[in-house]
Image (spheres, rainbow, N blue to C red):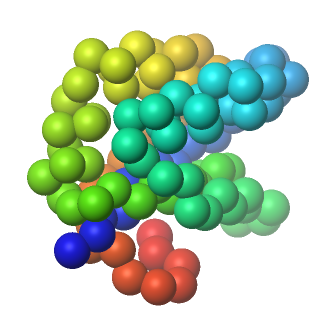
Amino acid sequence: MSAKVIMTWDISPEREQEYFEFVIGEFVPGVQRLGLQPVEAWATIYGGHPQIQVALIAPDAAGAQRILASADWLRLSEQLFSFVRNYSHKVVPARGGFQF
C-alpha cells in the first residue's frame, strides 16, 4: 500500500526568496531522485497551523522510512532546515483527498 510522507513547516521570514529558489531548484528534484513523488503542497493563509504542508508519495511505508533514514535525505533536509522552522513529518497510509 502506498504511503504518504506529510511534512509541515514555517518559512523563516528573512529567507523567503532563498527558500523558494531552493524548493524549486533543489528540493523537489531531490525528493524525486530519492523515489518520492510530490503530490500536494498547501499554504496556510490564516490561523494557527503550519504555514506550509507538503505531501510526498512512496511505494510503501517501509520504503518511505528507508528514504527518510538515508544519507541523501539527511543532506537534503539539512538544506531545507536552513530556510524553515517548526519542521515536522510523519508517514501515513496514503488515501485520496487532504490528509493532515
Q: Residue at x 50, y 40 (%)?
A: 32
Q: Is residue 9 left or right of residue 73?
A: right
Q: Let me know if residue 75 appears in the view.
A: yes
Q: Residue at x 13, y 52 (%)?
A: 62
Q: Is residue 41 above or below residue 93?
A: above
Q: Residue furthest bottom?
A: 96
Q: Residue at x 79, y 24 (%)?
A: 21
Q: Is residue 62 left or right of residue 52?
A: left
Quadrant showing the N terminus? bottom left
Residue 14 drawn at (x, y percent): 80, 18
Q: Is residue 84 left or right of residue 86?
A: right
Q: Is residue 17 above or below residue 8?
A: above
Q: Specify the quadrant of the image occupied by residue 54.
A: bottom right
Q: Specify the quadrant of the image occupied by residue 90.
A: bottom left
Q: Is residue 79 above or below residue 63?
A: above
Q: Residue at x 55, y 53 (%)?
A: 38
